[in-house]
Image (tube, helix red, strand yellow):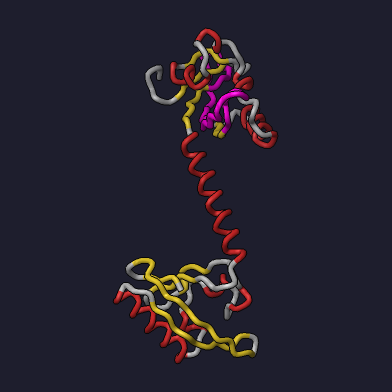
Amino acid sequence: LHTTSEGFFQLDTNYNIIDLNETFCKMLKKERWEIIGSNLAHYLSKLSKDKNDELSIKTRNNENVSIEVDISKDDDEPLYVLINASPLYDVNNNLGYFGFITDITKLKHIEKALQDSEKYLLSIFNTMTDILLELDNNGKYLFIAPTFPDVLLKPADELLGNYIHDVMNKTVADKILNAIQNTLSSNKITKIKYTLTINNNSVWFEATIAPKTSSSVLF
């Protein structure tokens, strides 16, 4: 336990740290003697109220604990860790806890980047007035961007997983499917024009079809 790459700690009945390994010391940027005897709660000051309440309930009920928290000091770079702890009883049946701490800072940065990317894409979609779809080589709806729902034949959640032949007349659906398959076989962009009846009105479309994968296109 003292040589594992994860942090390790053991708590007494009052949740004071009575043992830990060098990895946990490095995470806290403290010497072992500075940490021994201190209460674990001291390092969980950035825990949200909801998470803190959840932690209190679980420890009172002697349950396993799993929490994510930033244990860095205010003037340091964030250090996000995953703490997994379990009850530990001594020979006198006194309760303590032992646990492991995993550094998940890189994972948190990746999550943040993905969230930022998603927000960026949504902001782009919200300014677009064109439909953006992903269809497979059989005309199945794989993805519908939230760009211009007013010109969809049905709500997006009703189209996903269905095929263009399910919602369009056969002539138009055949034309679009033929263009999709030509695009995939040639691996080149294709453009087509077609008309659909939406809310009892004929609406003309000009579509650009581009290969996305070997079996799907962006439409």
| Residue 182: percent from left, percent from top | 33, 80
Q: Which residue is drawn at 50% across and 14% down?
A: 19
Q: Give the camera-side residue of 178 and 204.
A: 204
Quarter containing the N terminus: top left
| Residue 194: percent from left, percent from top | 49, 87
Q: Give the camera-side residue of 14 and 184.
A: 184
User: How many badges with numbers are in the image?
Assistant: 0
User: Image check: 54 left or right of 170?
Assistant: right
Q: Residue at x 51, y 86 (%)?
A: 168
Q: Residue at x 30, y 76 (%)?
A: 186
The residue positioned farthest toward the left in the image shown: 185
Q: Residue at x 47, y 81 (%)?
A: 164
Q: Give the camera-side residue of 43 and 187.
A: 187
Q: Is 145 rendered above or below residue 60?
A: below
Q: Is 154 rendered above or below residue 10?
A: below
| Residue 93: percent from left, percent from top | 56, 17
The residue positioned farthest toward the top in the image shown: 33
| Residue 15 image-quadrant placement | top right
Would residue 158 be counted in the magenta stretch?
no
What range is drawn magenta here? 69-97
Q: Give the camera-side residue of 55 and 128.
A: 128
| Residue 25: percent from left, percent from top | 49, 17
Would residue 91 be counted in the magenta stretch?
yes
